[in-house]
Amino acid sequence: MVRNRLAFPPNPGPTRKPLAKALAIASATILIFWIVILPTFEQLLRGDVRPVGLRCGAIIVAIEISVTMLYNFPCRSIMQRGIRGATGRAMLRAMRRVLTTAVAIVGAACAALAQEVHYSPEESLDAIDAKLIEASKVSIDLASYSLTDATVIDALNAAARRGVVIRIVLDPRERHDFAKLGDLSDNVRIKRGGPFMHLKAYEVDGTFLRTGSANFSASGEGAQDNDLVVIRDASAATKFEAHFERMWDAAEPMDEFAPAINALEPK
């Protein structure tokens, strides 16, 4: 029996909707990678772990969305048929668990790395300060009750020679090595009396804050029982910056401070 071909219209072929959905999924994946994942790894490479915890949460959400879209995508390809099977579903669940667990571990590790605590005399705190200062690229604002440690001052001078903008506020009552600070004198100010300026802190490039009990002196950084705390959080650095600006505006230039003038006079 010969079938009447006119009774069976030709198959119009697959609809274009799956292609449009595929393009939408690909675009969304690229966007998620570009906006969320790539900047996160770039910040990790720079040692900046401030927002990584939040971004890891965003990555987990992105993974959930991508896997859900992949499972529900109505494509008739071999891959899609495999994914819709029991084995494919189990594979997707396992992939989702592995990825979300890995990202959660990275986020927790980054949160732990966001703070460092060091102690003297077990550690040489001036060497740690020197490394932190060497990492600077743009600016350092430092407030110090005492500033005599040669390693720290040498690191500050080296950073200034690299083009880093350095500002220093000192307490007027404590000892400072004005002779070594001579090259930085235009960027050093002294508090005009009043209560002690008892900070031992600085922020670098607006990215992290160094604080703690250790004065920037040989005894404070190496002999005494002191701590040095590094907080890798932009908000902490910004808060310190606001306080520093107030002190900076109220302080007098180093070249108008009598002990500094005497220290810098030729012998």
Image (spheres, grey):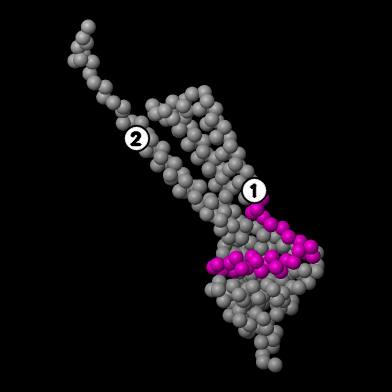
Q: Residue furthest top?
A: 1
Residue type highlighted by circle 2: Ala
Residue 58 in percent (x, y) is at 53, 43
- Location of residue 149 by image quarter: bottom right
Please tell me how crowded label 1 is: few (under 14), some (14-19), or many (20+) other residues with Cα within 10 Å. some
Pinpoint residue 88: horizontal percent, then vertical percent.
Answer: 50, 27
Calculate the distance from the C-alpha at mark 1 to the C-alpha at mark 2: 39 Å
Residue at 64%, 46% in the rendered image: 108
Disc 1 marks which residue? 109
- Front position in the image: 247 or 183: 183
| Residue ID at (49%, 50%) | 38
Q: At 76% across and 61% down in the image, what residue appears?
A: 119
Give the image quarter of residue 200. bottom right
| Magenta-colored span | 112-140
Nearer-the-camera pick, 67 or 148: 67
In percent of width and height, residue 237 lies at 60, 61
Asked if the magenta segment contains residue 129, the reply would be yes
Q: Secondary structure at mark 1?
A: helix
Q: Is residue 145 visible?
A: no
For marks 1 and 2 on the same chain, the one whose residue lies earlier in the sequence = 2
Q: Is 150 within the magenta? A: no
* Residue at 44 percent of width and 30 percent of height: 79
Location of mark 2 (residue)? 20
Q: Is residue 33 above or below residue 218?
A: above
Quadrant, the N terminus = top left
Quarter of the C terminus within the rendering? bottom right
On the picture, is 259 further left or further right than 106?
right
